[in-house]
Amino acid sequence: MNKFEALGLNDELLKAIEEMGFTQPSEIQEKAIPVLLSEMTDLVALAQTGTGKTAAFGFPMIQNIDADSRTTQGLIIAPTRELCLQISKEMEKYAKHYKSINVVAVYGGANITEQAKKIKRGAQIIVATPGRMKDMIRRRLVDISKIEICVLDEADEMLNMGFYEDITDILSHTPNDKSTWLFSATMPREVARIAKDFMNSPQEITVGSKNIGASTVSHEYYVVGARDRYAALKRLSDAHPDIFSVVFCRTKRDTQAVAEKLVADGYNAAALHGDLSQTQRDLVMKSFRTKQIQTLVATDVAARGIDVDDITHVINYQLPDEIETYTHRSGRTGRAGKSGISMVLITKSEMRKIKAVERIIGKKFEAKQIPNGMEICEVQLFHLVNKIKQTEINPEIESYIPAIQEVLGDIDKDELIQKMVSVEFTKFLNYYKKAKNLNIDAAENKGNSASFGDSTRFFINVGEKDGYDWMSLKDLIKDVADLGRDDVFRADCMGSFSFFNVEAENVEKILEAFDGYEMDGRRISVEITKRKEGGGNRRRNDRGGRRNDRRNSGGGGRRDDRGGFRGRRSNDSGSSGGSGRSNDRDRSFGDRKKSSSYGGGNKSDGGFKPRRKRRSDW
């Protein structure tokens, strides 16, 4: 007997399940389906990516639908277009033996009129991204006032992407007596807030423990220099010849750059990020699913729609901005009961983040070494040998054998084997024979707070007297230099000046960005300190800093009444407010961009007010 029968599913669904080859329900399906079939209730379900959540809410929704009514009865909200399309296709498979149930996907980047026509013809179930659904409600192209079930899938990621207001607006157009089912991989405060504000005494189902990583995934970290990330990525790929991986970068720019480098170096790679059109994304994902692409380089948001069971490795080229996001990344591998490996490339200054991630996922990382050149050559050699051994002989080669034997007939067996394997081995040997050691000893100088690997210490002539603390100072530097959240660290804010660190790869960005930079007529001076540990003694440096501040302040311009300065470049008369740079974070995959202002401050009166972060800074 198919074990799905015991969950209370009807014949139409059981027939579809059998055709899809499902025989054993996953834990989340086993726990959620009977609850959702037995009563109309609100539900919070916590389970990792790849555990079968779509079927856990999809089967009960379809069974509760009145197929004879054309009214929209079920609404599923997902964070990205990819995930929206993936869910709608799965729902169509589940409902294939219901002749009258129609599922319509509603997402940005496609013709809204065509989507509206499909809904008008009768769509009992709508799968939508928040931005497009909100737009259709505003245009009165959809009526969700009679829905009976609303599903919020990947709720943590939707809220992380800034969709809280969109979700609340959409829910305001739905009936109060509906059932709301919230599915999420993690349970941050924002998800708990949704449950409190919009759900009525929800039941809670947890598979595993809250926020932990999947048990089928092992976690490794490699400590390398900031300039060696790409070289380390290539070595990890070469050391695993059968790798089928997703490489995560923090920004669209890095994603595109890494993918282009890999392609130029002969790897089967492609980028997936929010700047690609829907057609481009579809082509990339089709190539990845068919393994024409061996390495997919992606941003966090773009990867939310990846549903591929055979991914062997996830490589974190950079750790994500939000700790919880690591759980989603690692969940791309180790799916459908298979094992997987999540690798992290970090610099020595980022070691503290590993401990933070360990606390969230409830698992320990294993410290590993980037393989050296000869280790990679050995791996590739035996991979080639095994590949030759396992290759099936093509019968069509038979007619060519006499000519081949004539060419190779005077070579004995041992020499022939050596020549065959040398073809591949020599290529790797030539490349790696003089390769340097990329590993950095994370324990070196342990306990010495002045040692930060390849990082560089900078002086800047703004401080607490200008209205800054270490958090708002980091915001200023990141915005001006167009850096990521964790690219600026060890920010020490003094009275009239401050210090901060960046990795070696970002030194030129800092120098270029602040070259000639002014805030409201005051020259902002940023210089590399002579000592890496600048700022080690506050009293001594504060005295020295005043002299430095007077020397470099450039006249000490007008202070804003909010305690800050308005920034501009002295050689850019066309810019004002210092906010001309756009953030490269891939927060806009789908329908909307997160709004941002200079340094996260309030510019309503032309000034700058430093913002305090809500989340702890790793």
Image: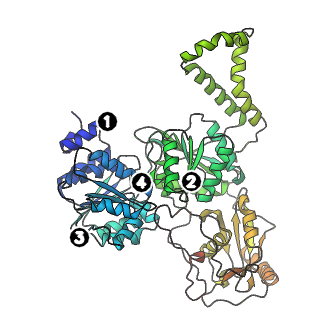
Q: Write down the residue under mark 2.
A: 354
Amino acid bearing label 3: Asn
Q: Is residue 143 left or right of residue 489?
A: left
Q: Is residue 531 left or right of residue 421?
A: right
| Residue 534 in sight here | no
Alpha-carbon distance for marks 3 and 4?
Answer: 27 Å
Residue at the spot 21% in from the left edge and 67% down from the top edge: 177
Q: Write down the residue under mark 3.
A: 176
Callout 2 secondary element: helix
Which comes sooner in the sequence, label 4 or label 1?
Answer: 1
> Residue 431: x and y, percent?
75, 36
Alpha-carbon distance for marks 3 and 2?
Answer: 43 Å
Which comes sooner in the sequence, label 1 or label 3?
Answer: 1
Mark 3 crowd level (few <14, some 14–19, many ≥20, 10 Å Cα) = some
Which of the 4 image quadrants contains residue 13? top left
Callout 3 secondary element: loop
Alpha-carbon distance for marks 1 and 3?
Answer: 38 Å
Residue at the spot 49% in from the left edge and 39% down from the top edge: 290
Residue at the spot 23% in from the left edge and 70% down from the top edge: 176
Amino acid bearing label 2: Ile
Q: Nearer the viewer, mark 1 or mark 3?
A: 1
> Residue 607: x and y, percent?
61, 86
Tag 3 and tag 4, C-beta contact below 8 Å: no
Alpha-carbon distance for marks 1 and 2?
Answer: 39 Å
> Residue 138: x and y, percent?
36, 73
Amino acid bearing label 1: Gly
Tag 4 and tag 1, C-beta contact below 8 Å: no
Callout 4 secondary element: helix
Which comes sooner in the sequence, label 3 or label 2?
Answer: 3
Residue 21 has which mark?
1
Q: Write down the residue under mark 4.
A: 83
Which of the 4 image quadrants contains residue 557? bottom right
